[in-house]
């Protein structure tokens, strides 16, 4: 299982690489990597396991964050009756997006960044994505809200982008006229 010691931190070169597309159907090795990412996200949201193994809670984790430069990430966001988003995404793409932007009023964090970084991170408010699942089957989703923000945060990891790259240094708490905060 992935532990915090397996998650590389800012400054590690792999976080700044563009990750490679994954061959389909998935090799056994790549399937295990994908499943381990989801296992971490689920474990980190389980209070007992997070406490027991000292895991930082996360709603997403990308392969580059465990020093594997491949285009794979997992996202799990709880919902009322069913998860808001529960995906393992292989070779994910944003195929279209809104002009309107959004941002988390509390800013963003990252399992690979051990310091608070203040500032709004502008994200597309609505996105249409395509990716492949563990069985190599292509799927398409329309996302908004936290699922859209999380998908863009994880996709950034596959392109060597960190969330603070998007923060306006001169005025970190400036929200442009197209952006509405996510409540
Ligand atoms: O480092 C990662 O990729 C996990 C990130 C994912 C993320 C960050 C900001 C906004 C959306 C997703 C975080 O550690 S997950 C922690 C978290 C939990 C709830 C809401 C936002 C962030
Ligand atoms: Ni991150």
Image (cartoon, rainbow, N blue to C red):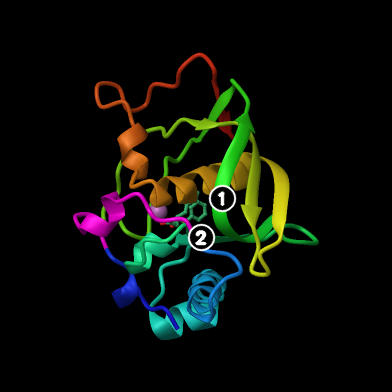
Residue reaching furthest to the top: 177
Q: Residue at x 65, y 63 (%)?
A: 133
| Magenta residue check for 8 | no
Question: Any atom of ligand 1 within 8 Å of the CB at mark 1?
Answer: no
Q: Nearer the viewer, residue 37 or 68?
A: 68
Read off the residue under disc 2.
Answer: 73
Read off the residue under disc 1.
Answer: 92
Q: Secondary structure at mark 2?
A: strand
Question: Any atom of ligand 1 within 8 Å of the CB at mark 2?
Answer: yes
Q: Quadrant of the C terminus?
A: top right
Which stretch is magenta?
9-22
Q: Give the percent coordinates (x, y) of residue 90.
A: 56, 59
Is 110 placed left or right of 177 in the picture?
Answer: left
Q: Residue at x 42, y 45 (%)?
A: 156
Q: Residue at x 36, y 68 (%)?
A: 66
Q: Nearer the viewer, residue 34 or 91?
A: 91
| Magenta residue check for 20 | yes
Neighbor class of circle 1 (other Cα within 10 Å; few <14, some 14-19, many 20+) is many
Camera-near label (2 vs 1) is: 1
Circles 2 and 1, Cβ within 8 Å, touching? The answer is: yes
């Amino acid at each position: 299982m992935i532990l915090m010691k397996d998650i590389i931190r800012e400054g590690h070169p792999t976080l700044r690489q563009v990750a490679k597309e994954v061959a389909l159907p998935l090799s056994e090795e790549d399937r295990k990597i994908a499943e381990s990412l989801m296992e971490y996200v689920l474990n980190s949201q389980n209070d007992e396991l997070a406490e027991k193994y000292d895991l930082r809670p996360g709603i997403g984790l990308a392969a580059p964050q465990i020093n594997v430069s491949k285009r794979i990430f997992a996202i799990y966001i709880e919902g009322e009756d069913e998860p808001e988003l529960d995906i393992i995404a292989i070779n994910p793409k944003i195929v279209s997006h809104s002009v309107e932007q959004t941002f988390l009023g509390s800013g963003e964090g990252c399992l690979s960044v051990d310091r608070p970084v203040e500032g709004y991170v502008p994200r597309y408010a609505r996105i249409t994505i395509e990716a492949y699942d563990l069985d190599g089957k292509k799927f398409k989703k329309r996302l908004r809200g936290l699922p859209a923000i999380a998908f863009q945060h994880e996709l950034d990891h596959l392109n060597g982008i960190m969330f603070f790259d998007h923060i306006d240094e001169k005025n970190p708490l400036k929200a442009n006229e197209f952006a509405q905060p996510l409540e």
